[in-house]
Image (spheres, coloured by chain):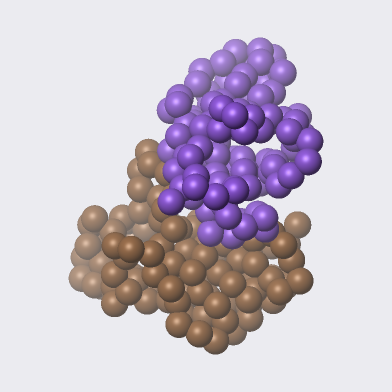
Chain colours: A brown, B purple
């Protein structure tokens, strides 16, 4: 299958700072990317869907000004957690789908800890 | 709206014993069904999917699942587990046939294989 790389795999940041997470499709052009969040011992919840070159569509209850998503190229989408708080600590996972693929592939995930 | 219920949050099982993970869903429209596996601190890997056709679906690593429309279930089975099957398993539904597109996940079932 296609490869999606997510970076960093782990990050610890101080409360009030911003953190950027990258999601890259390594061997295909990702026209659509999805960002999920997984709290400890809970399931994955879709946060937003982004299509290359357009604004992301956020799920109900997800603050778009806090979770900034940029999908400026066909191989890269970024999620920036702004003014992070301890309650933002979670496992963030992206998935990417290409124009010619019918399946979306998941990145390895990023564990964010806000202290 | 869709929802997915995984009835067991944890399933301990001895090596070489069979395992069944239960999944029930609800939806007002036709859905497509998926099972994913998540190893510790990793992203999700698609095990198998049901789109149409035969209700018995075979996936990777010896897993299979059976779609039962009348019972709205999609239980996952493996006749003989290995230590390496220790992981968390997620059942998911989508209105799209393309795996990984906008998914609704169940709460997950943690499988612990004991020697």
Asked where in the image residue B10 lies, by quadrant, the reply is top left
Q: Is residue A59 above or below residue B94?
A: below
Q: Residue at x 38, y 41 (%)?
A: A42
Between B96 and A75, the one nearer to me in the picture: B96
Percent of width and height locating residue B43: 56, 51
Q: Tell which of A90 and B103 is nearer to you.
A: B103
Q: How many marks?
A: 0
Quadrant, the N terminus of chain A: bottom right
**B4 lies above or below A52:** above
Viewed as shown, does residue B50 lie left or right of B2?
right
Residue at screen point 62% across, 43% down = B34
Rendered residue at 60%/48% (across/down): B30
Q: Quadrant of the C terminus of chain A?
A: bottom left
Left or right of B16? Residue A86 is: left
For the point 55% across and 39% down, which residue is it?
B91
Q: Work out whether residue B62 can be spotted.
A: yes
Q: x, y percentage for residue B63?
A: 71, 30
Residue B11 against residue A24 in the figure, above or below? above
Position of B42 compared to A29: left or right? left
Residue B64, quarter of the rendered image = top right
Q: Is residue B39 visible?
A: no
Pinpoint residue A51: horizontal percent, then vertical percent: 55, 77
Q: Position of residue B65 (x, y in %)?
A: 68, 31
């Amino acid at each position: 299958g296609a490869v999606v790389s997510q970076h960093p795999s782990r990050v610890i940041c101080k409360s009030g700072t911003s953190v950027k997470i990258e999601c890259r499709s390594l061997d295909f052009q990702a026209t659509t990317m999805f960002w999920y969040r997984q709290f400890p011992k809970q399931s994955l919840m879709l946060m937003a869907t982004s299509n290359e070159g357009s604004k992301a569509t956020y799920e109900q209850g997800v603050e778009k000004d806090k979770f900034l998503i940029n999908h400026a190229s066909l191989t890269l989408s970024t999620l920036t957690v702004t003014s992070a708080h301890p309650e933002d600590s979670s496992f963030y996972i992206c998935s990417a789908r290409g124009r010619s693929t019918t399946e979306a592939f998941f990145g390895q995930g990023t564990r964010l800890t806000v202290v | 709206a869709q929802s997915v219920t995984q009835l067991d949050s944890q399933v301990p099982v001895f090596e070489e014993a069979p395992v069944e993970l239960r999944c029930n869903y609800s939806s007002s429209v036709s859905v497509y069904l998926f099972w994913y596996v998540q190893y510790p601190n990793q992203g999700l890997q698609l095990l198998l999917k049901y789109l149409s056709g035969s209700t018995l679906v075979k996936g990777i690593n010896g897993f299979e699942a059976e779609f039962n429309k009348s019972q709205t279930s999609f239980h996952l089975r493996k006749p003989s587990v290995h230590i390496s099957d220790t992981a968390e398993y997620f059942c998911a539904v989508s209105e799209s046939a393309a795996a990984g597109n906008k998914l609704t996940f169940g709460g997950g079932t943690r499988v612990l294989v004991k020697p």
